[in-house]
């Protein structure tokens, strides 16, 4: 229809994509489970890939997640929190990258996480956890 605005804005007119990754949730981390909540700006995370999808507006794509600069990276394709289990106690780096549908990296954030030693016994229950809270 004449005079009707386009249903899709040109991608150049959008603000820059942004990524915010929050520190690991403390309670699951105490059990060795890393849960990272995140949000994006001017970007929607959906499981869509390919050259044509890179031109869609509003901007879409996925996250790349890499642990300890390791050889493996996986694609996280939803707004759900990133969950990592099974890491040895100690300091770990989780790199979260904002990727367009062609896997071009548009932004990155690294979160340092310290997985605690597993307690030999939790006979004291929650009181013991509170005593060691920082």
Image (tube, rainbow, N blue to C red):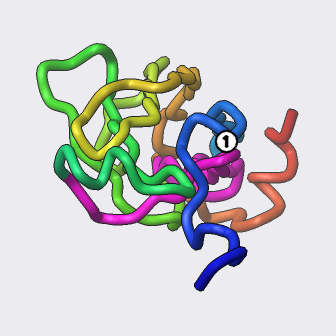
- Relative to the observer, which residue lies in front, 120 or 41? 41
- Relative to the observer, which residue lies in front, 109 or 2? 2
Tag 1: Cα neighbours inside 10 Å, few (<14), some, or many (≥20)?
Answer: few
Is 41 above or below relative to 91? below
Residue 3 in the magenta stretch? The answer is no
Residue name at image x 38 percent, y 25 percent: 105
Read off the magenta span.
25-49
The answer to whether one can see residue 74 in this image is yes
* Tag 1 residue: 14
Compared across the picture, whether 73 is left or right of 45 comes to: left
- Where residue 84 sits: x, y (%)? 38, 49
- Where residue 127 sits: x, y (%)? 83, 61
Q: Quadrant of the C terminus?
A: top right
Q: How many marks?
A: 1
- Where residue 42 sits: x, y (%)? 66, 47
- Relative to the observer, which residue lies in front, 108 or 11? 11
Residue 33 in the magenta stretch? The answer is yes
Is 79 above or below relative to 83? below
Compared across the picture, whether 123 is left or right of 96 comes to: right
């Amino acid at each position: 229809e004449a005079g009707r605005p386009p249903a899709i804005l040109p991608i150049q007119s959008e603000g820059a994509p942004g990524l915010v990754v929050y520190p690991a949730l403390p309670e699951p981390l105490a059990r060795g489970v890393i849960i990272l909540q995140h949000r994006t700006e001017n970007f929607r995370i959906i499981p869509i890939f390919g050259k044509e999808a890179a031109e869609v507006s509003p901007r879409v794509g996925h996250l790349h997640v890499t642990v300890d600069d390791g050889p493996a990276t996986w694609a996280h394709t939803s707004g759900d929190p990133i969950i990592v289990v099974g890491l040895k106690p100690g300091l770990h780096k989780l790199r979260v990258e904002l990727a367009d549908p062609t896997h071009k990296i548009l932004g990155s954030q690294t979160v340092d996480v310290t997985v605690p030693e597993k307690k030999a016994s939790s006979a004291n229950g929650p009181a013991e956890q509170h005593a060691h809270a920082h």
